Amino acid sequence: MAYRVLIVDDSPAMRAFVRRVIQLSGFELSTCFTASNGREALDVLRQEWVDAILTDINMPEVDGEEFLRRLSADELLHSIPVIVISTDATQNRISRLLSLGARGYVTKPFLPEVLRTELEGVLGVPVD
Amino acid sequence: MTDTLLHSALQESVDEVLEKMFFVRSFGDARGATDEREFIAGLSFVGEPSGWLVLCVTDQAARSVASDFLGEDEGGLSEHQIGEVICELANMICGSVLSRVERNATFHLAAPQLLPVASQCPGIPVEGAESHSVEIGNGRLKVLFQTERPAWSSTEKSAS
């Protein structure tokens, strides 16, 4: 099965890295959308359905926390699973993001297997 | 946190970020100065405590880590792409250090900025800054980390 994912990060290098890790992990991507902040991501989601969202926290305009709040408040979008990818490994931040609706939290630096496991979890499918 | 513990956090963060995200191993402490051009990225952070981090990576090493990170040939990378990767490296090292020294605090990291090519990496010692330099095969990487006041872990605070 091929998946549609949205990667949200203000770093083009990080967006490229995450995309590469997903593909190397064995996930077939039919479409990989990207956005550089939460506002752009919401613009994408108003036009395209995705199976999962991977998002950074610290971004300009609409950051990861506000993006999660807006997703949670949206009847159509709140069911899309979100994995946060961040350098912030502090307990306060992790707890807050999970309480805002994130289904997974991956701390940078991470091994590719960690992201794969999180994606398998939210997509509900093991990948060979 | 003592200078020794902060230095350990810096060392462990650099090693972990390089190994996990860039598939690069460090080869021990780098000594002496370098004449090679460097990519220099810096970012500030706000929290308890606030401070800044500066990362300097020599030209060839920067090209190599950018190539590993993006999965592209070195020759095909633009200066802009290499700079973006060095900024991301600085961001990850900074977040990793802060998470080690202040696990229960909350920080806001500013977007990393690439300093002009003509800049020179700050010499050591920079007053009050902790520094760590490593050889990474075809070059070297140096990190300077400073907080507005000594960083103390919450566990140490409560224990003291």
Image (cartoon, coloured by chain):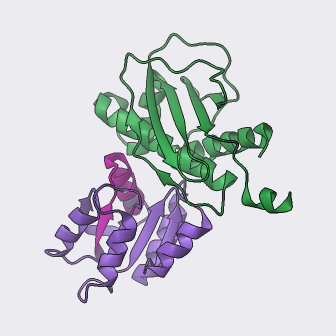
Residue reaching furthest to the right: B160
Percent x, y of residue A111:
55, 58
Residue reaching furthest to the left: A47
Residue reaching furthest to the top: B35
The residue stretch that appears in magenta:
A3-22
Percent x, y of residue B95:
55, 51
Q: Quadrant of the N terminus of chain A?
A: bottom left
Q: Residue at x 56, y 39 (%)?
A: B24
Q: Quadrant of residue B142?
A: top right
Q: Is residue B86 left or right of residue B2?
A: left
Of B96 and A99, nearer the camera is A99
Q: Residue at x 29, y 67 (%)?
A: A6
Q: Residue at x 38, y 16 (%)?
A: B118
- Can residue A127 be seen? no
Percent x, y of residue B30:
66, 22
Q: Look at the image and say whether residue A66 sits in the magenta stretch.
A: no
The chain letter corresponding to green is: B
Percent x, y of residue A122:
43, 80
- Can residue B52 be seen? yes
Of A10 and A19, nearer the camera is A10
Q: Look at the image and say whether residue A20 sits in the magenta stretch.
A: yes
Q: Is residue B155 left or right of residue B49?
A: right
Of B34 and B20, nearer the camera is B34
Residue reaching furthest to the bottom: A75
Rendered view: B26 above or below A70: above
Q: Is residue A34 left or right of residue A98?
A: left
Rendered view: B113 above or below A83: above
The chain letter corresponding to purple is: A
Q: Quadrant of residue A38?
A: bottom left
Rendered view: A41 above or below B131: below
